[in-house]
Amino acid sequence: MTRKSEEESVFLKEVKRDIGTFRRLHGKARVRFVWDYFRWKILAGITILICILLAVHMLILGQRPTRLRVCVVLNNDGYCSDWFDSFRKDLQKDGNRAAVEVNEDQPFDYDNAYSYMHELEVMTTISSQRMDAAVCGPDMYSYLLALGALAPLDNVLPAGLFAECDTRGMVKRDTAGLKILEDGSVDRSDAFDGCFALDISDTAFGRRYNPPKTDLSGQGSETHAEPLYYCIISNTEHTDDCAALARALVQD
């Protein structure tokens, strides 16, 4: 008998023995037996299934008609789903029932040890055109600005709306595309100036969802609030709906 046939014979004996053992067991003992022998294959199968389901889910979402995708990163742990639910209903009164997606689960905090992951997630979202606009604090705004991912608002917003926001002192002028080199110097080769955000801190939205924080570190207590900005991503294809969102956010 060859070595190969001997190995096949041993394998068949083990399989028959395991089948016999399984038949003799009952109830929970059978489940424990299967788990002990196949746990890693079961876990691998579950992992592969989850990955497939996630891929299918993302594919379906990518094909679903969407008129606006907004990323909201407030300066606190709050949520503003109720406000966006109301905005969605008003926006869809024009008869266009395509989805308005609001992502409130994207963290962005440079004080977090995993802030580089936040940057990677935001960059991936923008490059795949899954973000049309953002409501965010200084950390995410500064990253979008350095990335050169923001559209100049005077080119995107209707002239009347931009002029109104500018008169109210809401337009934030900055330099985009600045790069900090390893030695700490600033590379201005790709930099350009423009109006890249609306400061919505003092709007009805800002007062409701960006309340001042109490600082008890010094003598007495004082309140302060980090700015809250609205900005539009440069590769958006939904400028009209981004403008509609800007108009709703600046209402006082």
Image: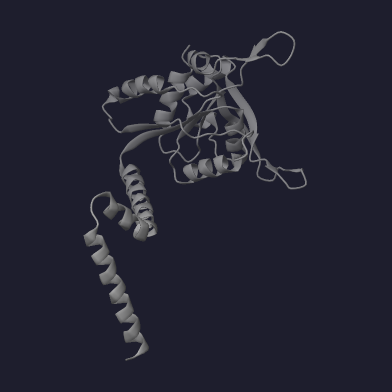
Q: Is residue 99 above or below residue 218?
A: below
Q: Residue 60: image x %, image y %?
A: 31, 45
At horizontal 62% and vertical 33% (from top left) the residue drawn is 142
Q: Residue 13: image x %, image y %?
A: 29, 75
Q: Residue 73: image x %, image y %?
A: 51, 29
Question: Horizontal placement of 50 versus 177: left or right?
Answer: left
Q: Quadrant of residue 188?
A: top right
Q: What colouring does the structure picture have?
A: one colour
Q: As rendered, which of 162 and 95 lies closer to the eye? A: 95
Q: Is residue 105 above or below residue 163?
A: below
Residue found at the far top of this picture: 220
Residue found at the far bottom of this picture: 1
Q: As rendered, which of 190 and 81 lies closer to the eye? A: 81
Q: Is residue 89 above or below residue 222?
A: below
The quadrant in which the N terminus is found is bottom left
Q: Residue 252: image x %, image y %?
A: 48, 11
At horizontal 35% and vertical 81% (from top left) the residue drawn is 7
At horizontal 63% and vertical 39% (from top left) the residue drawn is 113
Q: As rendered, which of 95 and 11 lies closer to the eye? A: 11
Residue found at the far front of this picture: 24
Image label count: 0
At horizontal 55% and vertical 45% (from top left) the residue drawn is 120
